[in-house]
Structure formats: structure tokens, C-alpha cells
């Protein structure tokens, strides 16, 4: 890979281009932190898609897009005399050093769980009023549930084993079924409790629920698109078919995709 000197040179080039665009480009000159916000969210999801697809070439480009946004925010911050790229980078470096006393201090840890626990304790020492303070309100609910559970686990608020968690899942499922046809609002709340418990169980068996659901979404989309393609190739119209007819193509698509997966080649 490239040397540190070349990496720094490339980063300096990006900073220079950002200065030039901010000064000369009509679009870049108009941007604010607020106008960039939704674009940054979009770029973040595109980055996530590349990771799910395991497309390293695409990932390289998406990292660059997101890095540009970070430099853009720092540029705007410097114009507001609030911060600049140097202060941003030094702040994150200082945070990393402070929160890794097992690397930059004399703290001894046995495993990553102790590292996480120390991280949360240090955050509280820094003035955080709650271990949940660092969980953004605008996170997607599935991701937010995972982060909440990871945070409280860091201070020891957790189940002892996964069997206990699975019992909780079954308990929440029963509570949901009890109110399903009686009270819609209550059913929605109970369904939320059930999902929260499932996310918790996923954590205990080392499954990332967001990744798991993303993979399932992708699998369904790929299979449905292939089904549509096969139906069109047979000169049929999807909207004119009944469920039984569509299901035959659905099963065919499943077999084709299973046989073309990389691990089957």
C-alpha cells in the first residue's frame, strides 16, 4: 500500500481542493451544515451497502465520498471560527488516547469486554450523565436497540446467559399474542418489546441484527427480481398471475440463486 508520506500528500490535496471549491464553485459556496446533513446520511447508507455487498472497489469510492463530507464540515466550521480540520483530528486523537489507558497508560485488561467496560466508565468520568447519552436519538430503531443494549452491558446491566434471554423472548411473544386482536396500540407496544428482546438475543449469540436483516432484505430483493425476470422471459405478466403460479417461479429463483452463490461454486 501507499507510504505514510503519500497518504498525507493525498489528504493535503483534498484539503486544497476543498478550499478551491468553497471559493470558486457556486454549488459548494452555497452549502451549509444543514444542507449537507441529508447528503451525508445518504452517503453513509451507500457505504453500508458496499460493505454488505462486499464490494471493495465500491467501498473505496464511498469512503472517499464520506471523507469529503467530513472535510466539508470542518471547512465550514473554520469559516465560523468554531473549529477546523486540525482541531477535529486532535480532538479525536486525544479522545482515543484517553479512552485507551490499557495502551497509553498502565491499565491492564484481559479481553475486549473489559475494554468496552472501561470505555463507558471513562465516559462517565468525563462528565456524561448517563451511559446512554452517546446514543443518537435519530438512529434507526433496530440499530438504536443494539447500541442501547451494548451500552448498558458495559456497566454490568445484563442477563447472565442466553437461555434467560430466550425465555424473555418467549414471554414477550406470549404477551404480544394475548393482545394482538384486542388492542392495536397495546399490540404495537408488545411487538416492540418482542423485537427488543430478539435484538438482545442476537447480541448473546454474536449476531448483528442490522446486518442479518440487511442480508435478508437483499436476498428477498434479488430473488424477487429474478422471479420477475423469469416471468417476463416466459411472456407472462406478474399482475395477471395468482399466488400459486408466482410461487412456482419463486421456488425456481431460490434454486438458481442457491446454485450461483460463491460458496457453491
Image: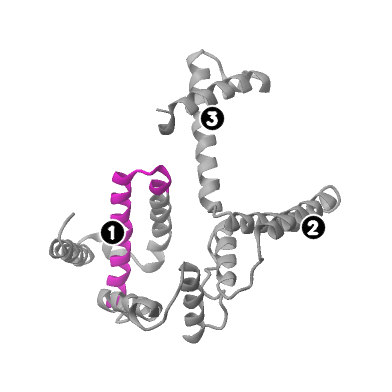
Please report contact status of discs 3 and 2: CB closer than 8 Å, yes or no.
no
Q: Which residue is mark 2?
A: 186
Q: Which residue is mark 3?
A: 224
Q: CA distance from mark 2 to mark 1?
A: 48 Å
Please tell me whether residue 197 is drawn above or below residue 99 in the rendered image: above
Q: Write the residue at 32% across / 62% down.
A: 69
SS assignment at label 1: helix
Q: Which residue is mark 1?
A: 27
Q: State whether residue 127 appears in this view.
A: no
| Residue stretch rendered in magenta on the structure | 49-78
SS assignment at label 2: helix
Where's the N terminus, which quadrant? bottom left
Please tell me whether residue 243 is drawn above or below residue 199 in the rendered image: above
Determine the main secondary structure of the stretch shown in magenta: helix
Near mark 3 (Cα within 10 A), the count class, few <14, some 14-19 or many ≥20, is some
SS assignment at label 3: helix
For residue 171, side relative to residue 43 (left or right): right
Q: State whether residue 67 appears in this view.
A: yes
Q: CA distance from mark 1 to mark 3?
A: 39 Å
Q: Earlier in the sequence, mark 3 or mark 2?
A: 2
Amino acid at each position: 500500500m501507499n507510504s505514510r508520506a503519500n497518504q498525507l500528500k493525498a489528504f493535503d490535496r483534498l484539503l486544497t481542493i476543498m478550499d478551491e471549491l468553497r471559493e470558486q464553485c457556486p454549488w459548494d459556496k452555497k452549502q451549509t451544515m444543514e444542507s449537507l446533513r441529508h447528503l451525508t446520511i445518504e452517503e453513509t447508507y451507500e457505504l453500508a451497502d458496499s460493505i454488505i455487498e462486499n464490494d471493495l472497489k465500491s467501498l473505496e469510492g464511498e469512503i472517499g465520498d464520506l471523507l469529503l463530507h467530513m472535510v466539508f464540515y470542518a471547512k465550514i466550521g473554520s469559516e465560523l471560527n468554531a473549529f477546523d480540520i486540525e482541531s477535529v483530528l486532535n480532538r479525536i486523537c486525544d479522545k482515543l488516547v484517553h479512552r485507551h489507558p490499557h495502551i497509553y497508560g498502565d491499565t491492564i485488561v484481559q479481553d475486549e469486554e473489559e475494554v468496552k467496560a472501561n470505555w463507558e466508565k471513562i465516559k462517565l468520568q468525563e462528565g456524561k450523565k448517563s451511559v446512554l447519552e452517546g446514543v443518537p436519538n435519530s438512529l434507526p430503531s433496530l440499530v438504536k436497540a443494539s447500541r442501547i443494549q451494548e451500552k448498558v452491558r458495559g456497566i454490568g446491566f445484563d442477563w447472565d446467559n442466553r437461555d434467560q434471554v430466550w425465555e424473555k423472548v418467549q414471554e414477550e411473544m406470549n404477551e404480544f399474542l394475548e393482545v394482538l386482536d384486542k388492542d392495536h396500540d397495546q399490540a404495537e407496544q408488545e411487538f416492540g418489546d418482542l423485537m427488543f428482546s430478539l435484538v438482545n438475543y442476537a447480541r448473546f449469540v454474536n449476531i448483528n441484527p442490522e446486518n442479518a436483516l440487511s442480508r435478508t432484505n437483499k436476498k428477498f430483493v434479488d430473488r424477487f427480481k429474478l422471479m420477475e425476470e423469469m416471468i417476463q422471459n416466459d411472456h407472462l405478466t406478474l399482475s395477471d398471475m395468482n399466488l400459486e403460479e408466482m410461487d412456482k417461479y419463486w421456488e425456481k429463483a431460490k434454486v438458481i440463486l442457491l446454485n450461483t452463490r460463491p460458496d457453491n461454486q
